[in-house]
Image (cartoon, rainbow, N blue to C red):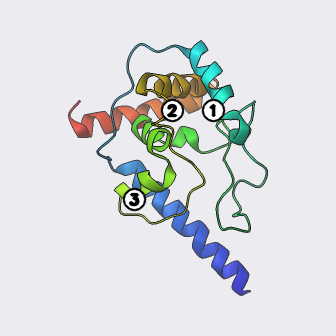
Amino acid sequence: MRRYLALSVILLGAAAAGGWLMSTVGPQTVSMPEAFDVAQGEDLYIENCAACHGANLEGQPDWRSPGPNGVLPAPPHDETGHTWHHRDGVLFDYTKLGGDATLALQGVVFQSGMPGFGDQLSDAEIWNIIAYIKSTWPERQRAVQAERSAAQRQREGN
């Protein structure tokens, strides 16, 4: 019973942190450029992301359940995951800074398995990866995600 209670607390905390993160702006956040290279993004995804998130964007097994170390496995980036729930700036920050650093900017302490790639990838390369991932989503997911990103840009005055 205690195990389920602890797991519930962890999952509720992760959900709350994710919701809060979606509604806030980190200092590293920038808007997705109008021009990007989806083909390069696919190549970069395969080189840098597929080992954890899957060659077909399927994520790791049991990605909603913390592993023995308390860290959630890598989620899918296809339409079955939650990536499309996040606005562009969150996706960029998470990729560039990593999960722990991005959440820390929001005042959230949460152990994430996502490393930062800011030292390995340029901003343009990160945007190309994001553009590739988004290009694989069905129209509904692309539309919802685009609407959330546009709403955030309006709040920011961009």
Q: Secondary structure at mark 1?
A: helix
Q: Position of residue 110 (x, y in %)?
A: 50, 64
Please determine whether, in this image, residue 108 is positioned above or below residue 105: below
Q: Secondary structure at mark 3?
A: helix
Residue at screen point 70% across, 86% down: 2
Q: Dot 1 surroundings within 10 Å: few (below 14), some, or many (20 or more)?
A: some
Q: Left or right: 105 with respect to 75?
A: left
Residue at screen point 70% across, 34% down: 50
Number of labels in the image equals 3
Task: Name the foreground residue: 116 vs 64.
Answer: 116
Q: Which mark is residue 104?
A: 3
Q: Quadrant of the C terminus?
A: top left
Q: Are marks 3 and 1 in contact (CB under 8 Å)?
A: no
Question: For the view shown, which residue lies furthest in the left direction?
Answer: 157
Task: Name the foreground residue: 9 vs 147.
Answer: 9
Q: Are marks 2 and 1 in contact (CB under 8 Å)?
A: yes
Question: For the view shown, which residue lies furthest in the right direction?
Answer: 61
Residue at screen point 60% across, 54% down: 113
Q: Position of residue 121 (x, y in %)?
A: 49, 29
Q: Which mark is residue 48?
A: 1
Whether residue 47 is visible to the viewer of this picture, yes or no, is yes
Q: Secondary structure at mark 2?
A: loop
Mark 2 highlights which residue? 120
Amino acid carrying label 3: it is Ala
Amino acid carrying label 1: it is Asn
Amino acid carrying label 2: it is Gln
Q: Dot 3 surroundings within 10 Å: few (below 14), some, or many (20 or more)?
A: few
Residue at screen point 65% across, 68% down: 70
Please determine whether, in this image, residue 67 is positioned above or below residue 123: below
